[in-house]
Amino acid sequence: MYRFVFSWRWIRLHVLIWLILIPAFISLGMWQRGRYHERKAENAVIKTAMDAAPVPIEGVDAVGAAVPKTNRWKQVTLSGVYDPGHQFLARNHQVNGNPGFWVVTPLTLSDGTSVLVNRGWIPTVSTDQQQSPDIPAPPAGKVAITGRLQQSETKGNTGIRDVTSGLPTGQISLVNTESLAAKTGLALRGGYAEVITSQPADSGKITPIDKPSLDEGPYLSYWFQWWLFCVIAIGGWVTIIRREAQHRVREAAEAAEEAEEAAEDDRDHTAPAAPASAPAP
C-alpha cells in the first residue's frame, strides 16, 4: 500500500521535508531561542543597574579602559565643568520617528580627566540631515549629573561603521571614546554617560534620552513559531502520503470494479444462444 513512498519522485519530497525544511526550521528556532535568552540576560543586567544606587564614575570607569558589559547601564554620578569647545553631534538618532542628533559634550572632572556626556537629543533643522543644528549651550559652571554608563560605541557592538571623514564639522557617527580622545586630546574615560538628571538643569531644547525598555521582544513567539512550522511540515508530509495511499486504494478498487464489469460483459457476449424449439406437428 505504501511502496510508492520509495519511488524517486517521493524520495525527493522526503529530502525536501526532512533534510532541508525541518533542519532549517529547527536552526531558525534555535537562533530565535538564543536571541530570547540574550535579551533576557541583557534586561536582567539593565534592571539590576537601574535598581541599584548611583555610584561615583571614578570607581567604575577609568581613562583608556573599556566598560565591561556588566557595568553598562550602571547609574553613576559625576561632577565637573562642561567643555563646549569639544562637543559633537552624533548622527542618525531618532525620537518618535523624527531624525536628529545626540548632543555629546565632554565634562571635565576635578582630577582633570573628562567624560563624554550624552546630554540628550535635538532634531534636524531641515530635510538635509547633513546640516548641523545649533547646539544649545550647556549649563555654565560646576554641574552635578546622574547618568547611565554606556560602553564606547564600535562597529562590533552597534553594527554601524565608524565614519571618521567626509562628515560636516562636529558630526560623528559613533560615540567612540578612543577616536574622540585622539581628536580632542582630552584624557577621556573609557565609556560615556547618558544624562538622567542634571543640576543645574540643561536646556529645555534638548530631549532627555529615554530609559531603556525591558521588553523581551518577539523572540519567544518566533522561537515557538519556527518549531511549530516543523510540526506542520511533518503533519503535512504524513497527510500527503496518507492521501496518496487512499487515492491509490480507490483507484485500485475502481480499476478492479471496472475489470469485473468488463469481464461480465465479455461473458454475456460469448455465451452460446439457446436452441430454437421444434415446430408443432
Image (tube, rainbow, N blue to C red):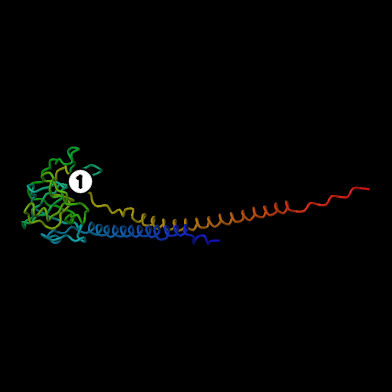
Q: Which of 158 and 93 is in front in this view?
A: 158
Q: What amino acid type should be assigned to the residue bearing mark 1?
A: Asn
State the residue at coordinates (23%, 42%): 98
Q: What element carries label 1?
A: strand
Q: Position of residue 260 (x, y in %)?
A: 67, 55
* Residues packed near mark 1 inside 10 Å, few (<14), some (14 to 19) or many (20 plus): some
Depicted 168 relative to depicted 145: above or below: above
In this view, the residue in front, 46 or 11, is 11
For the N terminus, the image quarter is bottom right
Residue 78 falls left or right of residue 36: left
Closer-to-camera residue (3/207): 3
Identify which residue, 28 or 18, lies in the foreground.
Answer: 18
On the image, the x and y values in percent for residue 182 come to 8, 54
Q: Where is residue 198 in the image (x, y as percent from the top left)?
A: 15, 49
Q: Is residue 276 left or right of residue 114?
A: right
Furthest-right residue in view? 281
Q: How many marks?
A: 1
Left or right of residue 142: residue 11? right
Q: Which residue lies under the disc numbered 1?
A: 92
